[in-house]
Image (cartoon, rainbow, N blue to C red):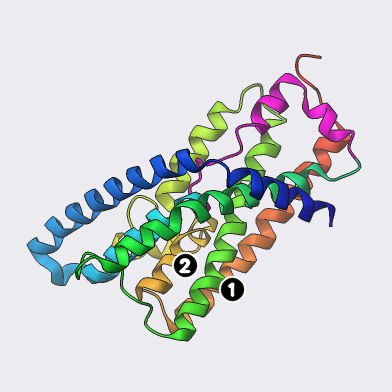
Amino acid sequence: MKYLSFFRLRFATGLQYRTAALAGIVTQFAWGFMEIMIFKAFYRADAASFPMSFQATVSYIWLQQAFLALFAAWMMDNEIFPMIINGDVAYELCRPVSIYNMWFARNAANRLARAALRCFPILAVAAFLPKPYGIAAPASLPCFVMFLLAMVLGLLVTVSFCMLIYMLTFFTISPEGLRMLFISGTEFLAGGVIPLPFFPDKMRAVMELLPFAAMQNVALRIYSGSMSGGEAGRALLLQLFWLVAVTGFGKILYRLVEKKIIVQGG
């Protein structure tokens, strides 16, 4: 219950930033339209050679923009890094709670709050855009249910990866190198820059097995129709596997932090 309280408090706090959400919505609309126009140019050249239909790609892009706050690797809790560097984390360690679980709950709530403010306007407008520039409806009810499950698992995997960065920061002088490496690599490998089906087959097969693909790739491809049936079921199981594996590794790092920690700056 105590971690649920942390979740509720951070979620309520995140809902207060409406002006920032409005600015984000405008930016994401502009970025979404730009991406769609770029893909449209390529599809005009040779649409038959692409692994996804243009409508599926458009749906993928609009969902990506609507739920950017859920899966973007760069949207971390910027309060945590200074706390670790300047030594204020000592106050957190004095609390009768697991800071791993507390930070996990706060991070998840922060992402959900941001997504809640931004997703509905983007999806509402995208739904009324003329075909094929608007978002399509899911293929079926089971497809939509699998999409929602993949969204939840993708969010949890993303937060678990962020927790790894927080835990590794305890063993470094500065978190900037870790953040730059994590953000640039994750966005590319998770399908944040180009959907994974557009990569060469051998490369894609490897990328889909990596933990990064368990973030946004699975949910967005299930909804867009690029992934279905047995392939979608296997992808969901792989998401669950990576959630357990990444969270378990993060917990191990947290135990090491608890046993021996050097508070920088005193």
Q: Is residue 77 left or right of residue 226?
A: right
Residue 259 location (% of width, % of height): 88, 36
Q: x and y percent of residue 4 in the render? A: 77, 55
The residue that appears at 64% across and 61% down in the rendered structure is: 243
Q: Amino acid at mark 2?
A: Ala
For the record, the magenta segment spans 70-95
- The residue located at (58%, 42%) in the rendering is 16
Lower position in the chain sequence, tag 1 or tag 2: 2
Q: Which mark is residue 214?
A: none
The percent coordinates of residue 124 (x first, y second) are 36, 64
At horizontal 68% and vertical 36% (from top left) the residue drawn is 168
Which quarter of the image is occupied by the N terminus? bottom right
Q: Amino acid at mark 1?
A: Leu
Q: Is residue 53 left or right of residue 256?
A: left
Q: Residue furthest top?
A: 265
> Residue 41 at what x, y percent from top left?
12, 56
From the viewer's side, name the closer residue of 202 and 156: 156
Q: Quadrant location of the C terminus? A: top right
67 vs 163, nearest the viewer: 67
Residue at 41% from the left image edge and 44% from the top image edge: 22
Residue that badge 2 annotates: 219
Taking the magenta stretch, the answer to whether it contains residue 94 is: yes
Question: Is residue 82 in view?
Answer: yes
Disc number placed over residue 237 in the picture, else none: 1
